[in-house]
């Protein structure tokens, strides 16, 4: 029988594409440290394993002062806990939380918590994990809107935090973020998950490769609450993995698409075969030019019918 077209779950040390992670286990963004919750939630309460709320991971350059949370990602906030630098859960803390007229949540973080490495904000609809950036030296952007890290689009998904000159945030729901699609010259809207007076943590889904222009740049635009815009052109690259439908037990070729990089850039793929799968070879290095000409990256053979996750780490070598 035919195995349906393969679905992809990326386990990457560069960026976590599937930020909707079960609250049963919370992995660090680097994929190395895991907090096992077993049957207890982040606030110590029992979780229904079949309906654990999703986890959203993001970075902010500061955890002090006012943080505005999009209610879409938490619903009613039940608790806030600290994270230390080993990403271990600390004590529950009392933080003043206000619901604004647009239903956004305003958290007022006291100065006593300014040294914390991260916060876990738990709500009925989801959990937000906020940490300080691992590397603040790669801030990039041509204008006043800048990214705090290198931008990387993985299977159409982008997670990023952008900084801008400080603003007075009264109605956070009126802020909007978009990326220009160079094919039709229209903007694709993303979601702002968290907002401070000078930065926004955002996510995009289903971005086409055409958002990256021939110079390897994306045009990012932030609409402020007063209706004016801040724009910037920021270096970005990305990739997609392509796998054809195949019979179970029959090897299917794995190819890829890379955009935003010159043809001589080298890309290394590291695959991990999951249960019922054989991915061979598990490691392959190709240039962007070779990849985009259709050279095979690997093959996958599966014994299991239906959607298949693929575990892959993709790195740029030069």
Image (cartoon, grey):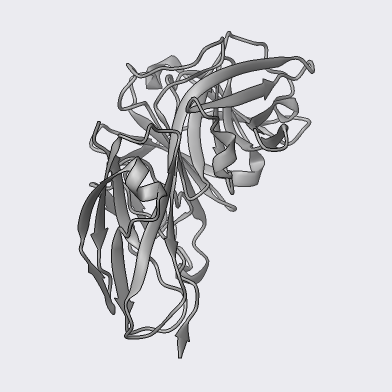
The residue depicted at 46 percent of the width and 80 percent of the height is: 306
* Residue 187 locus on image (x, y percent): 70, 33
* Residue 53 locus on image (x, y percent): 52, 57
Q: Is residue 275 above or below residue 14?
A: below
Does any portion of residue 39 appear in the rendered image? Answer: no
Q: Is residue 126 above or below residue 91?
A: below
Front residue of this view, candidates 65 and 230: 230
Looking at the figure, which quarter contains the N terminus?
bottom left
The residue depicted at 28 percent of the width and 70 percent of the height is: 274
Front residue of this view, candidates 245 and 28: 245
Task: Classify residue 287 by image quadrant.
Answer: top left
Task: Classify residue 238 by image quadrant.
Answer: top left
Q: Is residue 315 above or below residue 85?
A: below
Answer left or right for 212 relative to 282.
right
The residue depicted at 31 percent of the width and 44 percent of the height is: 28
* Residue 262 locus on image (x, y percent): 38, 31
Does any portion of residue 222 appear in the rendered image? Answer: yes
The residue depicted at 31 percent of the width and 23 percent of the height is: 135
Task: Classify residue 225 by image quadrant.
Answer: top right
Answer left or right for 155 relative to 184.
left
């Amino acid at each position: 029988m035919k195995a349906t077209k393969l679905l992809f779950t990326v386990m990457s040390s560069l960026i976590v594409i599937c930020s909707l992670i079960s609250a049963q286990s919370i992995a660090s963004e680097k994929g190395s440290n895991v907090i096992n919750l077993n049957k207890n939630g982040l606030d110590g309460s029992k979780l229904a394993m079949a309906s654990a709320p999703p986890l959203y991971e993001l970075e902010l350059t500061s955890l002090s002062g006012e943080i505005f949370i999009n209610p879409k990602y938490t619903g009613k906030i039940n608790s806030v806990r600290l994270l230390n630098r080993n990403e271990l859960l600390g004590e529950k803390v009392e933080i003043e939380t206000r619901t604004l007229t647009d239903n956004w949540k305003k958290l007022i973080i006291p100065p006593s918590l300014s040294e914390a490495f991260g916060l876990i904000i738990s709500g009925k609809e989801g959990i937000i994990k906020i940490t300080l950036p691992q590397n603040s030296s790669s801030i990039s952007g041509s204008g006043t809107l800048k990214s705090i890290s290198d931008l990387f689009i993985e299977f159409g998904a982008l997670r990023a935090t952008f900084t801008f000159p400080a603003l007075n945030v009264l109605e956070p729901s009126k802020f909007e973020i978009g990326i220009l699609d160079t094919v039709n010259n229209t903007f694709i809207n993303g979601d702002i998950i968290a907002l401070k007076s000078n930065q926004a943590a955002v996510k995009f889904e289903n971005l086409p490769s055409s958002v990256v222009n021939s110079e390897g740049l994306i045009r990012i635009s932030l609409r402020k609450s007063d209706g004016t815009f801040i724009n910037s052109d920021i270096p970005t690259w990305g990739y997609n993995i392509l796998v054809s439908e195949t019979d179970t037990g029959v090897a299917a070729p794995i190819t890829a698409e890379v955009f935003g990089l010159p043809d001589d850039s080298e890309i290394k793929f590291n695959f991990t075969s999951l249960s019922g799968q054989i991915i061979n070879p598990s490691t392959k290095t190709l240039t962007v030019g070779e990849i985009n000409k259709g050279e095979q990256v690997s093959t996958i053979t599966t014994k299991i019918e239906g959607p298949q996750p693929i575990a892959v780490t993709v790195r740029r070598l030069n």
